[in-house]
Image (cartoon, helix red, strand yellow):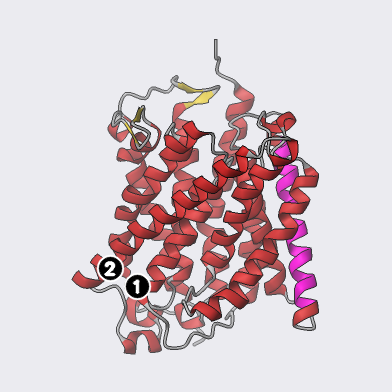
Amino acid sequence: MVMFDTGDTAWILICSLLVLIMSIPAVAFFYGGLSKRKNVLNTIFLSFIAFSIISVIWVIFGYQFAFGNDINGIIGAPANFFLQGIGLDDLNGTIPTLLFVMFQCAFAGLTCAILSGALVGRMKTKAWIIFVPIWACLVYVPIAHWVWGGGWLMQMGALDFAGGAVVHINSGISALAVALVLGKRKDTSLIPHNLGYAVLGAALLWFGWMGFNGGSGLAADGLAANAIIVSNVAAATGLIVWTIIDTYIVGKPTVLGAISGAVAGLVGITPAAGFVDVPGALIIGAVAPLVSYFAIYYLKPKLGYDDALDVWGIHGMSGVWGAIATGIFAMPAIGGVAGLVSGNPNQVIIQIISVIATIIYAFAVSYILAKILDKTIGIRVDDDEEVGGLDSNLHKESAYNLN
């Protein structure tokens, strides 16, 4: 008989707050620092409003459709709207169901906040506010059900401990789809206006990620400890490898490259954190920055898309690598599932199917949704607003009052 556990509950309470830190101040500072000075407030606003909208949607009906009883592997059965019928003593495993709802709410909000980074400097606020709830309903909720809520990918055996497909591939490919509809910025150069903000955001992301990955087993146990250790190792390795790349190619290490490498390493380990050991984490963390660096500095210029803050390059590409690498390095002694190196090559095939399914579905729906909004209300700001900056033109505010 499953019983309420105070230790597990206390741990997931903490982890929920850690993911909340990632969702609002961390992403906001990270993206805000990387953006142009004239767009910093708008960039931060995109994260805050996205998290707020999804928080409301999640408790009204989003959670129910994502984690309700499975319907044909596609979506959850609607029940408990507005969380009615879920009591204080109801449990999900050993923790209160209401706590599980909040933990998953933070994941959903974070995913959309990450997505916003590709769009900075050129998307209408009203278009974003309309896009967010529709995207959450049509893209995030179904994919979360497929992978975590008992849907067809979960039934197939796809492994995604903390959101390689659900969070990072999903946000990355959706961001790319909307960026393609928006088109290129008039000035595609983007020198961070305040790298200190970005470093603070990256540090908060690194800190919060320990709850993001460490809490995804929903227990205060050895699996949580392993998830934290391998996550930290992957982040550190990613930072070191990107620094080496910068030193070799640019001729000097850069702080921007260092924090980008850390985030890439964290993204890569996210789906694998509950399935791999330290050697696997070292490899995942080392390869993730290589994949993202290639996407940002070689693939992006060649294909010509304008992903402003490289959401696809870092979250999407490293998420793809991490999801496939989970199938390679999964250890039975860690998460109970064998990967390629443990004699189960079929797991790699399952992981590839989950990656392809997520990419195709999220891209198609996000692209169509952005196109519909563009044809109806228009999603791109006027040329004068873009050149003058969105802070002053859309919000009538300035981040820095130097008078």
Vertical arrangement, residue 308 with respect to residue 231, above or below? below
Task: Please say whether residue 83 is visible from this viewpoint.
Answer: yes
- Provide the residue span drawn in magenta: 225-247
Q: Nearer the viewer, residue 17 or 65?
A: 65
Q: Nearer the viewer, residue 39 or 383?
A: 383
**How busy is the neighbourhood of tag 1: few (under 14 within 10 Å), some, or many (20 plus)?**
some
Magenta segment, prevailing SS (helix, strand or loop) = helix
Q: CA separation, marks 1 and 2?
A: 6 Å
Residue 22: % across, % down: 56, 54
Dot 1 falls on a residue whose secondary structure is helix
Which of the two discs, 1 and 2, labels the residue nearer the N terminus?
A: 1
Of the residues shown, which amino acid type is indicated by label 2? Lys
Residue in the picture at 68% in, 57% down: 265
Residue 160: in magenta span: no
| Disc number for residue 40 | none
Dot 2 falls on a residue whose secondary structure is helix
Q: Nearer the viewer, residue 345 or 107?
A: 345
Which residue is the extreme one toward the left? Answer: 376
Residue in the picture at 42% in, 88% down: 186
Quadrant that contains the N terminus: top right
Residue tagged 1: 181
Badges 1 and 2: C-beta atoms under 8 Å apart? Answer: yes
Of the residues shown, which amino acid type is indicated by label 1? Val
Residue tagged 2: 371
Quarter of the rendering containing residue 246: bottom right
Vertical arrangement, residue 314 with respect to residue 220, above or below? below
Residue 147: % across, % down: 47, 39
Vertical arrangement, residue 372 with respect to residue 266, above or below? below
